[in-house]
Image: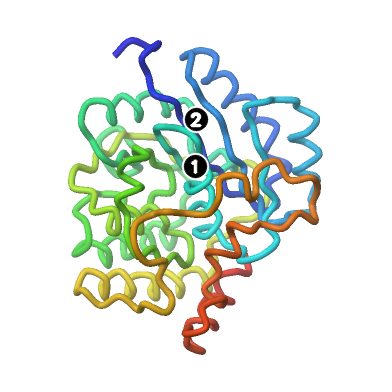
Amino acid sequence: MPQTERPSLTVVVPTYREAENLPEFLDRMAAVRAAHSLQLDMLIMDDDSGDGSAEIIAARGMPWVNLVVRTSDRGLSQAVLEGLFLAKGEVLACMDADLSHPPESLPEMMRALETGADFVIGSRYVAGGSTSDDWTALRWINSQAATLLARPLTSVRDPMAGFFVLRRSTFEQGRDFYPIGYKIGLELIVRCDCQHVVEVPIHFGNRRHGKSKLTLKQQILYLEHLRRLYMYRCGIVPFSSAITGKTSGPPRSSTRTPKGPDSKSLAGQRLLQDFSPRATPDDRAANRLGRDR
């Protein structure tokens, strides 16, 4: 497909204390955008980092980069889901800002979408994919065990991936979103009923700066997330806590271009499970656990 016919793309980037990584990340994204003439805009969904991220983004003066400061319902999955609701593009992407996901792979992932896929993963575990050489044996075993636990839900090789692309129309077919933890890609594959998932090989690098957010707490949340997805596949949807129905989403103007770090994320509040009067104590406890990144 000629570049001029390519659909618009919104990249959703969840962040929490990634100020050290943002300059290089923004430079690489700008280079990819220019080199491939992409109609690309970016939503950086920041969980009120207070680390200078807002100032770095403002200083760059990139009109295609929008910052949303989230001060409630913090957590990676919630941030991504809110960003997808707010996105303007015909194609939606998600990736991390810590430089583990290569921006240079976005054009190839979009081409896979254009040739018939309904969900495209930047994958570590297909032919041509790789991870950094300094991955420990424990980290590799954890990743493989998590993949095996998800096998009944999807046959893809890297269901844990947080680097993915899908059409807006696919996202809008999703139902009963109930995100928790970090594996929002798996959530979308299951609840958007993605049948043709394509994996594009990437090199998954180590984060350049800062500390990994993958903790024991997140691994526990992953098990809870799997429980929810298996219940969904069995037709059991906890109405009090799921975001029910098709993806109507929050108002597009509710969180875009906040005035400062105290701006409230009204869309995030719509996603806040605690706001449901029928939420159980277990729902509220799980949500509070997922909020602290």
> Which residue corresponds to the image point at 29% horizontal and 14% vertical from the top-left?
1
Residue 200 is left or right of residue 282, and the answer is: left
- Residue closer to the observer: 256 or 20: 256
> Which residue corresponds to the image point at 72% horizontal and 58% vertical from the top-left?
264
- Residue closer to the observer: 199 or 72: 72
> Which residue corresponds to the image point at 66% horizontal and 57% vertical from the top-left?
265
Examine the rendered structure and indicate whether residue 11 appears above or below residue 139. Answer: above
- Residue closer to the observer: 253 or 263: 253
Can residue 172 be seen by looking at this rendering? yes
Q: Residues within 10 Å of mark 1 (few under 14, many from 20)?
A: many
Examine the rendered structure and indicate whether residue 52 appears above or below residue 188. Answer: above
Q: Residues within 10 Å of mark 2 (few under 14, many from 20)?
A: many
Residue 180 is left or right of residue 115, and the answer is: right
Q: CA distance from mark 2 to mark 1?
A: 8 Å
CB contact under 8 Å: marks 2 and 1: yes
Residue 93: image quadrant is: top left
Look at mark 2 in the image and give the residue it sits on.
103
Residue 272 is left or right of residue 143, and the answer is: right
Q: Amino acid at mark 1?
A: Met
Residue 83 point in image, percent of width and height: 53, 48
Can residue 122 be seen by looking at this rendering? no
Extreme residue toward the bottom, this view? 281
Residue 207: image quadrant is: top right
Examine the rendered structure and indicate whether residue 102 appears above or below residue 189. Answer: above
Residue 252 point in image, percent of width and height: 56, 45
Of marks 2 and 1, which one's residue comes earlier in the chain? 1
The dot on residue 95 is 1
